[in-house]
């Protein structure tokens, strides 16, 4: 199973978007599945279900940080290179979906308002939209890390 299929499988079985995007990459960085799932958990649904930055985006940015990021023994050029790759990711994601903001990506519907949450469910936005956000985030990330 490739990373996109793996990510979608996580998402379909109840893990959030950030968990679903980060976890298929974890083994490349010596991270266990459980560590990835726990680390990304708070970033789902736009950071703690606040519908800010889409969890698919934050999951991807974690992968970019793991791949390109500045560690303790690295100089600042790695940090700035990571920022460049992050901007490149966000630009590609925005070009494809119009935003990186979870609330905007779900048509302004709030998960925390019961009647709007029912509308999200009725319109199957998690399946219709979020599945694409997860798969596209993985694919864009794979291109960026080569």
Image (spheres, rainbow, N blue to C red):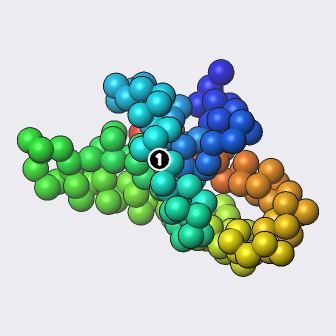
Few, some or many residues within 10 Å of mark 1 (<14, 14–19, 20+): many
* Quarter of the view holding residue 110: bottom right
According to the image, label 1 marks what residue?
Answer: 40
Count of all numbered marks drawn on residues in the image? 1
Residue at position x 47%, y 47% from top? Answer: 40
Of 23 and 15, which appears nearest the observer?
15
For residue 131, side relative to residue 39 (left or right): right
Q: Which residue occupies the foreground of this view, 70 or 119?
A: 119
Q: Position of residue 12 (x, y in %)?
A: 74, 39
Give residue 17's position: percent from left, percent from top. Answer: 61, 49
Query: x, y percentage for residue 132?
Result: 72, 50
Q: In this view, does 85 lie to the left or right of 22?
A: left
* Residue 7 in the image, given as x and y percentages of width and height: 62, 36
Can you say whether 145 is above or below 104 in the image? above
Residue appearing at x 45%, y 36% in the figure: 36
**Quadrant location, the N terminus:** top right
Q: Would residue 125 be seen by someone viewing this image from the given angle?
A: yes
The residue under the point 76% across, 55% down is: 126
Q: In this view, does 83 lie to the left or right of 133?
A: left
In the picture, which quadrant includes the C terminus? top left
Identify the element where label 1 is drawn: helix
What residue is shown at x 14% (from left), y 55% (from top)? 76
Outermost residue to the right = 122
| Image position of 29 with respect to 63: above or below | above
Location of residue 39 (image quadrant): top left
User: Vertically, is 122 above or below 52?
Assistant: above
Observer-nearest residue: 145 or 35? 35
């Amino acid at each position: 199973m490739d990373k996109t299929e793996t990510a979608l499988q996580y998402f379909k079985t109840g893990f959030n978007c950030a968990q679903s995007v980060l976890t298929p990459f974890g083994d490349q960085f010596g991270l266990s599945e459980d560590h990835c799932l726990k680390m990304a958990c708070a970033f789902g649904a736009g950071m703690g279900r606040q519908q800010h930055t889409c969890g698919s985006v934050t999951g991807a940015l974690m992968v970019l940080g793991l791949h390109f990021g500045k560690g303790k023994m690295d100089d600042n050029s790695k940090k700035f290179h990571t920022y460049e790759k992050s901007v490149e990711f966000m630009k590609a994601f925005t070009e494809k979906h119009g935003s990186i903001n979870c609330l905007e990506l779900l048509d302004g519907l709030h998960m925390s308002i019961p009647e709007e949450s029912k509308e999200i469910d009725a319109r199957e936005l998690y399946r219709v939209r979020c599945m694409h956000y997860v798969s596209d985030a993985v694919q864009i990330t794979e291109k960026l890390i080569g």
